């Protein structure tokens, strides 16, 4: 049975999604079905033999078969009406809006499409950096303190340096480090180009950062290696963009067993039941020997395959451990009782 990969859609991370999806050709060993969402929110089936980045930038993808999302999955036109596109499960690789904000998750749930990826609640919590901080606090995981502002608010910064982030974007899009007052107004304008809300955090130099990915399979946590990403002032968009097509496993960070245990413990607290059905990556800071969550990547670039020794097997196992949907029987008992009481049938 095939695995379907859905990618693209209309977001600031549209191109990143394309890069992530193409990288899966070298990772997933099952037959792949590529489903592309263009900027007009239309679905196209992309043949495996044709998928490359220029297919999308040139608009050639429009010559591919169009698909319709209906009850039970995706369908394409055939001589005898609509034909179901058969696959075992769908992998959500739409980064940013639609994919990580819960829009597609709600559609997949509504149309009963089995998928690997964050569910609606998980998407809402992880897509909004301000919500994520409050969620982490409830999970007893520390985060760097921040101030939250909406467009039109009066913004005052007392101490520098700070880092300014749009609330709902990833891949360092719209993020700026501000070292003095003269740089503040421009950085705020940049952030508000991408979102109507921002957060401002103190920028902590030379902080240790560690990335840990994982998922839960039948109540057992499966962890990746822990990576210490390349150090720079911060990973800008270009560095992260290149990072999204990684397929070779990276080296594990040199950690003592106590810190490794604490990182995994923090990951479990954050994942709990909220992120079941998805493989996530949590990015942590170590500040004064304490663990702080930086962000939760609910659909990490290239699914963080480079952090796992046997990613393909883990993904297949995760597809067999998707959270069950509650069965609801619609019987019309209440309506029938009302009609019976009125003497009607």
Image: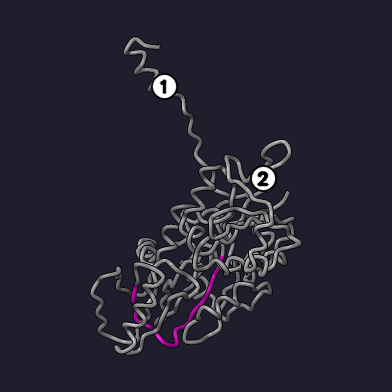
* Disc 1/disc 2 C-alpha distance (Å): 38 Å
Q: Which span of residues is magenta-colored?
A: 199-213
SS assignment for the magenta stretch, majority: strand
Task: Tell me residue 216's x, y (percent).
Answer: 56, 57
Asked whether residue 43 is drawn in magenta, I would say: no
Task: Tell me residue 32's x, y (percent).
Answer: 71, 56
For this view, does 46 lie left or right of residue 97?
right
Observer-nearest of 83 and 109: 83
Residue at image point 51% right, 78% down: 237
- Residue 180 falls in which quadrant of the image? bottom left
Residue situated furthest top in the rendering = 343
Quick check: 343 above or below 215?
above
Query: Residue beneath label 2, please?
Result: 76
Quick check: 114 above or below 46?
above
Whether tag 1 and tag 2 are in contact, CB under 8 A, the answer is no
Query: Residue beneath label 1, please?
Result: 333
Quick check: 81 above or below 233?
above
For this view, does 334 lie left or right of residue 123?
left
Which dot, 1 or 2, sits closer to the camera? 2
Q: How many labels does the image show?
A: 2
Task: Tell me residue 288's x, y (percent).
Answer: 39, 82
Residue at image point 43% right, 53% down: 121
Q: How many residues crowd around disc 2 within 10 Å: few (fewer than 14), some, or many (20 or more)?
A: some
Q: How many residues crowd around disc 1 within 10 Å: few (fewer than 14), some, or many (20 or more)?
A: few
Asked whether residue 208 is drawn in magenta, I would say: yes
């Amino acid at each position: 049975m095939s695995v379907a990969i859905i990618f693209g859609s209309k977001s600031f991370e549209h191109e990143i999604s394309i890069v992530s999806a193409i990288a899966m050709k070298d990772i997933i060993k099952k037959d792949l079905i590529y489903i592309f969402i263009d900027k007009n929110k239309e679905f196209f089936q992309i043949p495996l033999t044709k998928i490359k980045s220029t297919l999308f930038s040139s608009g050639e993808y429009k010559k591919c078969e169009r698909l319709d999302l209906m009850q039970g999955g995706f369908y394409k036109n055939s001589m005898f009406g609509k034909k179901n596109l058969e696959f075992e499960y769908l992998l959500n690789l739409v980064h940013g809006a639609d994919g990580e904000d819960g829009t597609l998750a709600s559609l997949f749930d509504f149309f009963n499409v089995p998928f690997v990826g964050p569910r609606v609640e998980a998407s809402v919590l992880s897509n909004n950096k301000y919500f994520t901080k409050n969620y982490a606090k409830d999970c007893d995981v520390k985060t760097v303190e921040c101030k939250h502002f909406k467009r039109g608010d009066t913004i005052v910064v007392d101490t520098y340096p700070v880092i300014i982030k749009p609330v709902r974007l990833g891949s360092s899009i719209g993020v700026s480090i501000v070292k003095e007052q003269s740089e503040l107004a421009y950085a705020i304008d940049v952030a508000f180009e991408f979102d109507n809300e921002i957060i401002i955090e103190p920028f902590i130099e030379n902080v240790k950062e560690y990335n840990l990915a994982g998922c839960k399979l039948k109540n057992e946590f499966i962890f990746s290696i822990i990576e210490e990403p390349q150090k720079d002032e911060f990973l800008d968009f270009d560095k992260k963009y290149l990072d999204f097509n990684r397929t070779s496993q990276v080296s594990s960070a040199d950690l003592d067993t106590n810190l490794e245990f604490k990182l995994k413990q923090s990951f479990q607290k954050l994942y709990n039941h909220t992120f079941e059905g998805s493989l996530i990556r949590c990015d942590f800071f170590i500040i004064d020997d304490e663990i702080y969550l930086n962000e939760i990547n609910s659909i990490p670039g290239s699914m963080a395959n480079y952090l796992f020794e046997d990613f393909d097997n883990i993904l297949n196992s995760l597809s067999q451990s998707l959270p069950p949907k509650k069965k609801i029987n619609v019987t019309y008992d209440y309506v029938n009782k009302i009609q019976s009481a009125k003497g009607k049938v």
